[in-house]
């Protein structure tokens, strides 16, 4: 089995690459190293069935060459992180829309199955008890998005869905909720590595807003096997699946737990959103996944606890 991982030098992509190699796949990681790092692939490069291609997913000729002869593509390359999206909106849109177009088109030309990494952000400001995969949202979301990143991912989903309908291309969509683990840098606004880094350095932990906003963090080693199982499950084709953590925690409680667990002298500082992201920025109060579909189809049941996640992230720093 020859698998392509776009964004393979990134946080999630590098863990996925290692898992696929362990499974016996030949893996080609395509990455422009914009936020990804070669050192994330230190383990993979030792493997005889691993190839790294440095390049841009918007380079249609390159993507076509890489996809030719593959059995499946895991498309994770994207402009990711609040800072990048806010500071470079046009560049992010180009990567997140044109890049996916070029990957989809290569998959169509060479009849290669695709798994698209989408995001819980496509649910917009919805704070329902648990967000479930509503088919209407696949097409409706770009119009309701709170920012360009989510709009682009919604458009990607719509294109992927259309390629499946129109060309019978086997496409599976996963909507990832806050995924955390080793190799996530935190340079671009990811809360867990940021807070852990501050705690380890003895700096104040920066919590935006009132800190009562909640998230469900999931561990990358729970997420990537589920991505592979979903891609391999024929009944997943043409559908979107939530993959998220199973416990809800406020950011303030998260910060307190990090301080406690890492025995840090740091205090917690509440900072208005405007200071980091400019006027008018509003965060989602709550984001909780309904994982029923992925649980029913491939037995997705994340087991890693918040404490284990915090320790793993701290060990990685
Ligand atoms: P990441 O930044 O570590 O990974 C993205 C990778 O894509 C990087 O290695 C980067 O260098 C590469 N890349 C960016 N632009 C590229 C381009 N034009 N051509 C080639 N490569 C390019 O972030 P991540 O958290 O590992 O995210 C992986 C995927 O999962 C993304 O599609 C992201 O939208 C999605 N996702 C992640 C989360 C999360 O919590 N981490 C949540 C929802 C969705």
Image: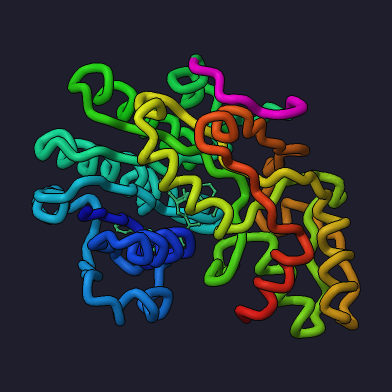
Rendered position, 234 above or below 183: above
Q: In this image, 6 relative to 313: left or right?
A: left
Colour setup of the view: rainbow
Relative to the observer, which residue lies in front, 301 or 139?
301
Q: Find out whether residue 134 is within the magenta segment.
A: yes
Q: In this image, 45 relative to 80: left or right?
A: left
Rendered position, 144 above or below 189: above
Relative to the observer, which residue lies in front, 45 or 141?
45
Relative to the observer, which residue lies in front, 66 or 276?
66
The image shows residue 63 at horizontal and vertical percentages of 16, 52
The image shows residue 242 at horizontal and vertical percentages of 56, 35
Tell me the quarter of the picture where residue 282 sits. Answer: top right
The image shows residue 192 at horizontal and vertical percentages of 69, 63
Residue at left 62%, top 57%? Answer: 219
Residue at left 22%, top 70%? Answer: 49
Residue 268 visible in the shown view: yes
The quadrant of the image that shows the C terminus is bottom right
Q: How many labels does the image show?
A: 0
Q: Find out whether residue 119 is within the magenta segment.
A: no
Residue at left 51%, top 37%? Answer: 298
Rendered position, 83 above or below 215: below
Tell me the quarter of the picture where residue 97 sits. Answer: top left
The quarter of the rendering in which ligand 1 is drawn is bottom left
Residue range highlighted in magenta: 128-135
The image shows residue 196 at horizontal and vertical percentages of 73, 72
The secondary structure that most of the magenta stretch takes on is loop
Residue at left 39%, top 49%? Answer: 92
């Amino acid at each position: 089995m020859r698998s392509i991982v776009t964004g393979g030098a990134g946080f999630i992509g590098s863990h996925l690459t290692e898992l696929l190699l362990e499974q016996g796949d030949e893996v080609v990681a395509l990455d422009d190293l914009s936020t990804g790092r070669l050192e994330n692939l230190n383990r993979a490069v030792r493997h005889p069935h691993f190839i790294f291609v440095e390049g841009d997913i918007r380079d249609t000729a390159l993507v076509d060459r890489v996809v030719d002869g593959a059995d499946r593509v895991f498309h994770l390359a994207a402009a990711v992180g609040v800072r990048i999206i806010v500071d470079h909106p046009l560049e992010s849109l180009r990567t997140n829309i044109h890049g996916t177009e070029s990957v989809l088109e290569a998959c169509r030309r060479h009849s290669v199955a695709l798994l698209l990494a989408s995001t819980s952000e496509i649910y917009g400001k919805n704070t329902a008890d648990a967000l479930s995969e509503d088919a209407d949202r696949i097409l409706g979301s770009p119009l309701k998005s709170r920012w360009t990143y989510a709009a682009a991912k919604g458009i990607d989903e719509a294109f992927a869905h259309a390629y499946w309908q129109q060309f019978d291309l086997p496409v599976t969509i996963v909507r990832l909720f806050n995924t955390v683990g080793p190799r996530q840098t935190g340079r671009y606004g990811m809360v867990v590595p940021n807070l852990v880094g501050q705690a380890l350095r003895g700096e104040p932990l920066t919590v935006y807003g009132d800190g009562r906003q909640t998230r469900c963090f999931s561990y990358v080693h729970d997420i990537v096997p589920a991505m592979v199982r979903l891609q391999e499950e024929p009944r997943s084709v043409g559908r979107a699946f939530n993959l998220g953590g199973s416990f809800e925690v406020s950011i303030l409680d998260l910060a307190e737990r990090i301080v406690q667990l890492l025995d840090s002298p740091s205090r917690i500082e509440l900072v208005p959103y405007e200071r980091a992201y400019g006027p008018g920025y509003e965060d989602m109060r709550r984001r909780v996944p309904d994982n029923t579909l992925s649980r029913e189809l491939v037995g997705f049941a994340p087991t890693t606890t918040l404490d284990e996640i915090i320790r793993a992230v701290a060990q990685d720093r």
